[in-house]
Image (cartoon, helix red, strand yellow):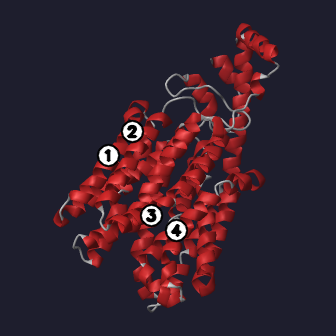
Amino acid sequence: MSEQRRALPQTSGRRSHATTALVLLALVLVSVNLRPAITTVAGVMAQVPGVFGLDPALLPLLGTLPVLAFGVSGLIGPWLARRLGTGRAVAVALLVLAAALIIRSTVPALLLPGTFLAGMAIMTASVLVPQIVKANRGTGWWTGLCTMGFGLGAALGAGLIQPLEQAFGGSLPPALAVWAVPALLGALLIYRTDETTMSALAFSRRVTTAARATAASTTAVGAAAVGAAAAATNVSPSAVKVPLRRQRTAWAVTAFFGLQAMLYFAITSWLAVYLVSRGLASADAAALLAWFSLAGLPASLLAPVLASRPAVLRWMAPGLGLSVAAALLGVLVAPAELQFLAVGLLGVVQSAGFGLGMALVVIRSAGPESAGKLSAMSQGFGFALASLGPLLAGLLHTATGGWEVTFWVLAAEAVVLAIAGFFAIRGPLVSAGSGTVRGQSSGVSSRYEQLIIDEPAK
């Protein structure tokens, strides 16, 4: 082992703690910027027709457009990262986000196109966050801080939009446009981390190649046997690549991410309306919706940390799905005076599911490049599925005239989420692109192979 370690490429020195902290701070700031574009509008939806001249019949479309944009733009991030570098690609996405926020707020006719463009920019940056975490060998705390940033951004957007409107003299457009400022700051900071991230990616590829070569030279008999088998089939072992669409683990991770996102958007779209139907005042229902996001912040931080422990991950993924199902039914049957507790519990388990969904992209991928592609697949297909959540919940409510069927269907979906989680943590790691490792199972992969895959640029 020591000889193998000495054979690996050496770096010019350990990265300073300040550099690592800068990368982590940039990732958290990026994450915080990836929800306010949605929740700020949701918090003032009733004012939008009067301020922007939008037909009230188009309000559901306004709420759905960002999620639809998520579903169609998942591949833009990896494509842009290959041409510009990961950090620079995220910076470009945040610049586009800032421009979209300003355009949709200042030009009423561009409210809908600007919202769709903002959704595409959010998705482009979002899919690259796990790749940067993987490249820098980020721990579960890294993923947890990023997922907490998503929740914090959502809560800040919903909670600050009305105070900002008052601060601007009761004018809504500048209160919406001002969110371009943190997006610009995030773009500047993540741009400065690009060199660090690209060095980490390059080192990861070099160390994997060198380690395989060293391991092969120390196991000549095994290598000869593999070579003979490959020659018999005219296939080079190193040339064999399995597309993500043919890897069952990739589909399981995608299903888990998509189902939890579908539940999230269905809940956030209709929870306040449901609570009003139970006799709560509109202001109290809105406060409980904000509480739903705030209660989940600690869970979104801790879920990726706990998921990094294999013994916990085995029960955590399926267990969260069942917990969401139970919490949904709890909100359905709880009396009005207990909704604070019921909604809080739902927020905890739902946010933990999102944190785990992001963590699975990192944990179940074989390297930074694989993490980026799995992130694009899981979030692209996942958000396309998630866009159906609000629509399905609304249609069920309209068709039945109540909420019982809607909540039972959502609970059944949460059970399917548990099944997807069960399969997501089993089977081979997801491998894509050059320099990846195939055939590793979460339960049997050796510590040395994982060390090769995840070795950072120090």
Residue 377, percent from left and from top: 61, 48
Whether residues under marks 1 and 4 lie with C-beta atoms below 8 angstroms apart, the answer is no
Q: Amino acid at mark 4?
A: Thr
The residue under label 1 is 323
Q: Is 163 drawn above or below residue 18 in the view shown?
A: below
First in sequence, mark 1 or 2: give its number.
2
Residue 383, percent from left and from top: 54, 56
Q: Amino acid at mark 2?
A: Pro
Mark closer to the observer (3, 1): 3
Residue 318, numbered label:
2
Residue 4, numbered label:
none
Mark closer to the observer (4, 2): 4
**Residue that protrudes farthest toward the front in the picture:** 399
Q: Residues within 10 Å of mark 2 (few under 14, many from 20)?
A: many
Residue 98, percent from left and from top: 62, 73
Residue 390, numbered label:
3
